[in-house]
Image (spheres, rainbow, N blue to C red):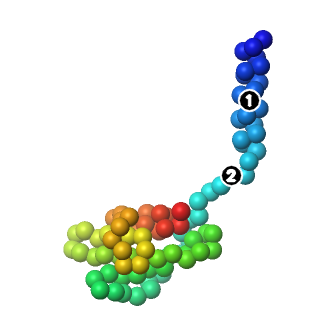
Amino acid sequence: MKHLQTFLGSCLVILSLSALPSVQAAQPTNINYSGKGNGYRLYTVRCSDGKKRMITSWRKKKSDKWCLGKGKKSRCTRSQLNAAKKACR
């Protein structure tokens, strides 16, 4: 009997959690060139939550980097899309 109560209690918890609205991270919807700085290029990322965020492209021969923020070299990736996704989170 105790096992049945524990099982039913667990089911209720799972059902109540699944009834909560799901929260999804914003996704990039558009990436546009915005200008250039000293050794980098700026891009504006428009996200599905309506906000705009900046990413920076640092270009060197074989080691392109896409970083979050304007003219920053932190939180970087080699992919423009991955940087845009991170910016929208």
Q: Please tell me whether residue 41 is drawn above or below residue 85 in the rendered image.
A: below
User: Residue 73's x, y, as percent?
Assistant: 33, 71
Quarter assignment of residue 24: bottom right
Disc 1, disc 2: CB below 8 Å? Answer: no
- Would you identify the image quadrant in which residue 78 lies? bottom left
Residue located 35% across and 67% down the image: 74
Q: Is 17 located above or below residue 66 in the figure?
A: above
Q: Is residue 66 visible?
A: no
Q: Quadrant of the N terminus?
A: top right
Q: Quadrant of residue 68?
A: bottom left
Q: Earlier in the sequence, mark 1 or mark 2?
A: 1
In the shown orientation, is residue 51 left or right of residue 18? left
Residue depicted at x 65% and y 55%? 23
Q: Residue at x 31, y 75 (%)?
A: 58
Q: Amino acid at mark 1?
A: Cys
Which residue is painted at 73% across and 34% down in the image?
A: 13
On screen, residue 89 versus residue 4, left or right, reads left
Secondary structure under the numbered disc 2 in the rendered image:
loop
Q: Is residue 23 left or right of residue 28?
A: right
Q: Residue 61 location in percent, x, y?
A: 21, 74
The CA span between labels 1 and 2 is: 19 Å
Q: Residue furthest left?
A: 61
* Residue 29 visible: yes
Query: Residue flagged by tag 2: what amino acid is it?
Result: Ser
Q: Position of residue 29 (x, y in %)?
A: 56, 71
Outermost residue to the top: 1
Q: Which mark is residue 11?
A: 1
Instruction: Describe the element under mark 1 as helix, strand or loop.
Output: helix
In the displayed structure image, the side of residue 87 where residue 65 appears, left or right: left
Q: Which residue lies under the disc numbered 2?
A: 22
Horizontal and vertical percent position of residue 32: 48, 81
Counting the numbered discs, the total is 2
